[in-house]
Amino acid sequence: MATELFNNGKHLCLMFSDLVEEDADAVQANQFLIIDHGHGALIDPGGNMTFNELTLTMRKYMAPQDLHYLLASHADPDIIASLDRWMTASKAVLVISRLWARFAPHFCKLGKTDKRIIGVPDAGGTLRLGQSDLVLLPAHFLHAEGNFQFYDPISKILFSGDLGVSLVSGEQARHPYTHLNDALPHMEAFHRRYMVSNKILRYWASMVRTLDIEMIVPQHGAPIRGKAAVAQFIDWAESLSCGIDLMTQNAYRVPDQPIALAV
């Protein structure tokens, strides 16, 4: 099922949040489709668990073979493990950090990605889609070394990858947060572990405050909707201790306990 995030008749943003079965032993993940004047970009298309349902569901809006871009915030399996199948099902070009451009072909059969990968420089840039431009925002170390977020100036949506994640079900992900306090119980532990450092979050906050953002939509969990909630999240992230800020010598000791083999 697709959730319509924005639609002005010519520019459409969709979220697919429930394509992984609720009882599957895998994290819930969102995929996003932006269509502008008939030109399509699929953001963080996902792994093999989502491919079949995503291709079927998106046909109501755009045939997979008509996609122009696959946008990947980074190269984790839940982002692009299905790349081999997308390279077959479409003529789309993969857009990913240049740090990962030489790693992404490992998801595919030999030769499938030839001349079909755009490596984005660290500074980011703009990407033409139909009659609009998507902004590829640097988000390095949030959480990947080469990491990008995607800002759509038409919808004023920031597609934020792993920043802003809340660990909820696919059904819950369809219901946006309009106040940050409702999200924090599902959000805080993830960010403390997966974000690299407060220094990086401060740089990110300074950057995104220059943008007009109506909604932050992460790759897992529910959107953060409304300027008030967006501002609350930016303020919270800017002050968060996380990652290496929390590490001590206790995390780096030679282990002496056996790993349980039962599964």
Image (tube, rainbow, N blue to C red):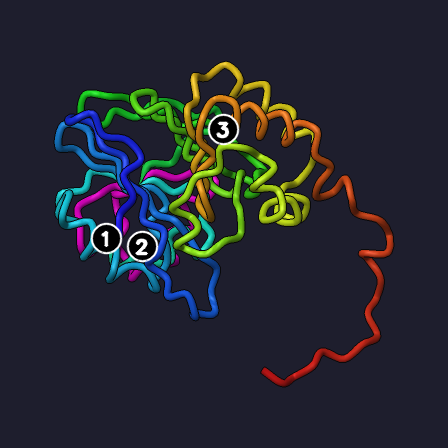
Q: Position of residue 91 (x, y in %)?
A: 17, 46
Instruction: List the residue tagged with mark 3.
Output: 138
> What residue sits 25% from the left and 60% below the top?
53
Residue at the image point whose x is 38% and y is 28% from the top: 157
**Type of the residue with mark 3:** Pro
Of the residues shown, which amino acid type is indicated by label 1?
Answer: Met
Q: Position of residue 156 (x, y in %)?
A: 37, 23
**Eye-nearest disc, 3 or 1:** 3
Question: Magenta part mainly helix, strand or loop?
Answer: loop
What residue do we see at 43% from left, 22% from top? 213
Residue 92 part of the magenta segment: yes
Q: Nearer the viewer, residue 146 or 196?
A: 196
Asked if marks 1 and 2 touch (Cβ < 8 Å), the reply is yes
Q: Which residue is mark 1?
A: 87
Q: What residue is drawn where x is 84% and y is 66%?
A: 254
Give the Cα separation between the discs numbered 3 and 1. 25 Å
**Cα–Cα gap, marks 3 and 2:** 22 Å
Question: At which x and y percent is residue 87?
Answer: 23, 53
Q: In which quadrant of the rendered view does residue 24 lie?
A: bottom left
Q: Secondary structure at mark 1?
A: helix
- Quick check: 226 above or below 62? above
Residue 43 is covered by the magenta coloring: no
Q: Which is nearer the N-term, disc 3 or disc 2?
A: 2
Q: Amino acid at mark 2?
A: Leu
Counting residues from the start of the chain, the first of labels 3 and 1 encountered is 1
What residue sits right under mark 2 in the picture?
Answer: 83
The residue segment tinted magenta is 87-116
Q: Is residue 217 left or right of residue 198?
A: left
Quarter of the C terminus within the rendering: bottom right
